[in-house]
Image (cartoon, rainbow, N blue to C red):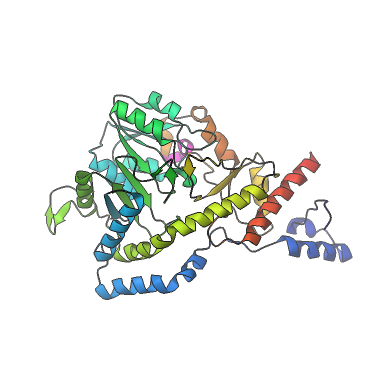
Amino acid sequence: MSTKIVDVSPAASTNLTGSVRVAIFTVVKGMVMDIKFLDLQAQYQSIKSEINYAIDRVLKSSTFALGPAVQEFEEAYAEFCGTRYCVGVDSGTSALVLTLRSLDIDLGDEVVTSANTFIATIEAIIHAGARPVLVDVDPVSRNMNPALLEKAITCRTRAVIPVHLYGRAADMAPILRIAEEKDIAVIEDASQAHGARYRDRRVGSMGLAATFSFYPSKNLGAIGEAGAITTNDISLARKLRMLRDHGSERKYYHDLVGYNARMDGIQGAVLKVKLKYLAKWNERRNYVARRYHEGLSQAGITLPEMNDDYYQVFHQYVIETDRRDELQTYLRERGIPTMIHYPAPNHRQLSMRFLGYSEADFPVTEKLAGSVLSLPIYPELTDDQIDFISQRVTDFSYQCEQIA
């Protein structure tokens, strides 16, 4: 194949006829590959018998809400995270809401969190009755910028929620130090970072509590909605268990005004099976990320930072480019799906305008919203697929250079 870059998109090829069009389609055949952004079916097939057996056990026991399967998973996940307790709930959002409510955070209180996060982090603060206070992120880590945290804290601040975005831990040392000095709670939002580490500590074990989502697309995903809270605080764990189950420790006796946020037995059973494979799956994600790094080294784009202080689990592999939308279209035409995490910052969402922020308040978050692009990354992605994606991104960069 010639080193000259030719536009072989379906749109361009419709203007060609005869032998030229035949020749172009011969090239297209070698430049298009059917790739999924995430292949949950491949994961299921790899452990199908174990998953089906675990589900069958729950069906036979008829314990569909909480029960032994959930308790077994809670014990296993607490051990995995290096904490004493894990409380299973029905979603990552519920995990955040219940944790905030367990700390008696209410009207008039403030909770500081990252501007660059999925909206659930901010929704949970609002549902708990508090006011979200957003801080901008570091341009390299894309997580909360600790240098901006202290200025955001007021006499009304009750907690800070650092988000471990894309599978990389936030810079926890300064965040924990500032929180201790100000006597405010740290709640880790670890919904995208199952198994990640910061220095020698695993995500989920550093704050007063940590919340996890097990949405199906997560590194550790359920077959529906599920979430959990990890903590070393026995009183907090007890209160969380009550809040998830209508404020009750004994059936029909309700000491607190609680919620219906119980984890399903089937989800607990499936998660316990998958947990055995999480470390291996995370290692494979790291392999994919390293192979991307090698393949994209000449692509003229910004790659995620590799830093020895962090063991990343690459929930997403996020690149940055000023020609993001053009690149996304180029890749889609060649059978490569991508996603944007996230195209519209939270402070510009219609539901969040009441917070009163402007675009100028979060310049890094704004820049990321216009430049980030997530490439496919999951354990079942093959070397050929990784290399194909890397080559197409590099081809696009070369084509842009030629045009310029």
Q: Check if residue 133 falls in the magenta segment.
A: no
135 relative position to 376: left or right = left
Helix, strand or loop: magenta stretch:
helix
Q: Dividing the image into 4 quarters, which one contains the N terminus?
A: bottom right
Farthest left residue?
Answer: 253
Task: Kindly identify the residue that appears in the image at 29 percent across and 55 percent down.
Answer: 88
Task: Kindly identify the residue that appears in the image at 48 percent across and 50 percent down.
Answer: 313
Does 382 appear above or below 98? below
Quadrant in which residue 384 is drawn: bottom right
Residue 375 in sight: no
Task: Kindly identify the residue that appears in the image at 41 percent across and 42 percent down.
Answer: 200
Residue 364 versus residue 73: which sits nearer the camera? 73
Quadrant in which residue 402 is drawn: top right
Does 359 appear above or below 212? above
Residue 317, position as x, y percentages in the image = 55, 49
Residue 322 versus residue 351: which sits nearer the camera? 322
Number of numbered discs on residues: 0
Residue 124, position as x, y percentages in the image = 34, 43
Please state the extent of the stretch shown in magenta in the rendering: 346-351
Residue 36, position as x, y percentages in the image = 58, 61
267 relative position to 325: left or right = left
Residue 53 versus residue 98: which sits nearer the camera? 53
Task: Kindly identify the residue that appears in the image at 63 percent across and 60 percent down.
Answer: 383
34 relative position to 199: left or right = right
Does 349 appear above or below 253? above
Residue 299 in sight: yes
Q: Dividing the image into 4 quarters, which one contains the C terminus?
A: top right
Residue 257, position as x, y percentages in the image = 18, 47
Farthest right residue?
Answer: 19
